[in-house]
Amino acid sequence: MGKIVAIVNQKGGVGKTTTAVNLAAAIGAAGHRVLLADIDPQGNGTTGLGINKKKLSASSYEVIVGGAQASEAIIPTSFSNVWLLPSSMNLAGAELELVELKQRESRLKAALSLVRDDFDFIFMDCPPALGLITINALCAADTVMVPIQCEYFALEGLSQLMSTVRQVKRLYNPLIDIEGVILTMYDGRLNLTQAVVDEVKRFFPRRVYSTVIPRNVRLSEAPSFGQPVMYYDRASRGTVSYLDLADEFLAQNGKKSQAV
């Protein structure tokens, strides 16, 4: 049965989608079957995997709001062992539509439960907000992965995120846990960076990955070519970092690379 991981931070611009796309690609390249569920109305995870949102016949909107089967919307990508549940602009109105629906907090969980046996890992790229779409992700998830940028306001709002996770744990999903915290946009030359790292480690003791994601031009360029960074520039620092993160993630989950 595949493990479901929600990649969440209600603060935008922290490297959430970058992590979702590149970690999925790295784990897929390691020989594990991966589904990236793009449930962010911006749909950057979808375009980051080279999919044209205008040509979709179904998306996560139809699955969450319309009751479509996830299998009807999931599509293969050009990248090894990576499948996508794409997003579309229709998802932007889903927050209001969900309010009127029964079991509105668990619709994504019900949909993914029918396909989770088809994958080793399912990563959900969540919107930068703690609304009903993110609540759906937290109800469906086994664990939560939190990207945090190494900048001054890094911890702003994290207490609210943790409060939401605890509330979901109490009300809907008693087994949910923290998978890990990823430090992004890392620049070891700055004193501020180390100060933020120390603060994050105090906030999340023993939950911070040793792999850090640097500021890297290739990481920024790759989405415009519809490719994860390891396919765009195999030798880049961004590629090396996400391959290392994938290895660390797999090791913590008792898995190894199966790549030949």
Image (cartoon, rainbow, N blue to C red):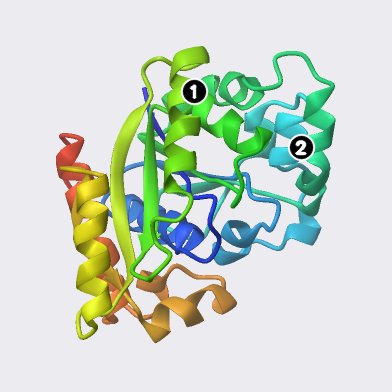
Instruction: Say which amino acid is labelled 1.
Output: Gln
Judge whether residue 34 can be spotted in this image: yes
Instruction: Between label 1 and label 2, give the one nearer the viewer.
Output: 1
Give the mark nearer the N terminus: 1 vs 2: 2
Q: Is residue 153 above or below residue 81?
A: below
Mark 2 falls on what kind of element?
A: helix
The picture quadrant where one finds residue 136 is: top right
Q: Quadrant of the C terminus?
A: bottom left
- Cα gap from disc 1 to disc 2, whole angstroms: 19 Å
Q: Is residue 160 above or below residue 81?
A: above
Q: Foreground residue, 26 or 202? A: 202
Mark 1 falls on what kind of element?
A: helix
Tell me: 71 left or right of 113. right
Residue 222 place in picture, x, y as percent: 48, 77
Q: Quadrant of the N terminus?
A: top left
Residue 241 place in picture, x, y as percent: 25, 68
Q: Is residue 122 above or below residue 129?
A: above
Residue found at x 76% / y 24%: 67
Residue 173 place in picture, x, y as percent: 46, 17
Q: Is residue 246 above or below residue 33?
A: below
Residue 85 place in picture, x, y as percent: 60, 43
Q: Disc number at residue 95?
A: 2
Residue found at x 38% / y 24%: 176
Residue under pointer 1: 167
Residue found at x 57% / y 58%: 45
Count of marks overlaid on the render:
2
**Mark 1 touches mark 2? (CB < 8 Å):** no
Tell me: 105 left or right of 31. right
Instruction: Say which amino acid is labelled 2.
Output: Glu
